[in-house]
């Protein structure tokens, strides 16, 4: 039987981690945003009207990681030791890869996932005018494959 640690007596709860030891923890998450080739070119060339897309997305991811406990109700407030936010261009998409490191009693997967999500949403926001079709729809733009790539405990 699967145990859901955030539910007790049919009520949501924050898990008690006070008995755990502090250890180094690390999580890597990734996700993709699919964009028109013209939009990818504009990002590459620094020609997006709203400014430097990837620098803005990097800052947004960092802020989101720090705000994760405020956004996800049962996440613990943790001390973040390091954050890296990288972007890779693929065939028709940008991939965001976020690495979060902490020393504490609980993992940092939710922080890494939140960072990736907000980075990709920030990219979308900054290029949405170029992505819309004549009807104001987004026929190409989509966010996919947000997932935990790896997590480590006791690194």
Image (cartoon, rainbow, N blue to C red):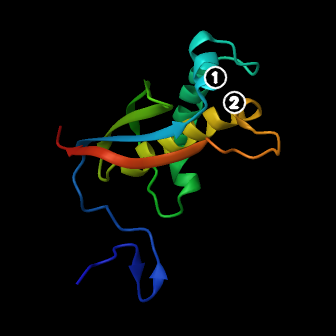
Residue 44 vertical placement versus 143 (above, below): above
Q: Position of residue 35 (x, y in %)?
A: 58, 34
Residue 122 vertical placement versus 11 (above, below): above
Say which residue appears at 58% left-offset and 25% top-offset. Answer: 37
Side (left or right) of 95 relative to 42? left
Say which residue appears at 56% left-offset and 23% top-offset. Answer: 54
Residue most extreme to the front:
134
Q: Which mark is residue 123?
A: none
Residue most extreme to the left:
154
Q: Earlier in the sequence, mark 2 or mark 1?
A: 1
Say which residue appears at 26% left-offset and 79% top-offset. Answer: 2
Residue at image mark 1: 38
Res 63 → quadrant? top right
Res 15 → quadrant? bottom left
Q: Position of residue 20 (x, y in %)?
A: 24, 58
Residue at image mark 2: 127
């Amino acid at each position: 039987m699967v145990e859901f640690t955030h539910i007790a007596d049919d009520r949501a709860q924050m898990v008690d981690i006070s008995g755990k030891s502090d250890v180094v923890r690390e999580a890597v998450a990734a996700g993709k945003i699919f964009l028109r080739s013209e939009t990818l070119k504009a990002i590459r060339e620094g020609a997006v009207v709203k400014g430097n897309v990837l620098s803005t997305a990097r800052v947004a991811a960092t802020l989101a990681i720090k705000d994760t406990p405020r956004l996800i109700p049962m996440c613990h407030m943790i001390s973040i030791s390091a954050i890296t936010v990288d972007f890779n261009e693929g065939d028709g998409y940008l991939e965001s890869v976020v690495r979060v490191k902490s020393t504490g009693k609980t993992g940092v997967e939710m922080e890494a996932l939140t960072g990736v999500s907000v980075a990709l949403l920030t990219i979308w926001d900054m290029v949405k005018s170029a992505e819309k079709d004549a009807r104001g729809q987004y026929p190409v733009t989509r966010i996919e494959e947000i997932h935990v790539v790896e997590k480590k405990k006791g690194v």
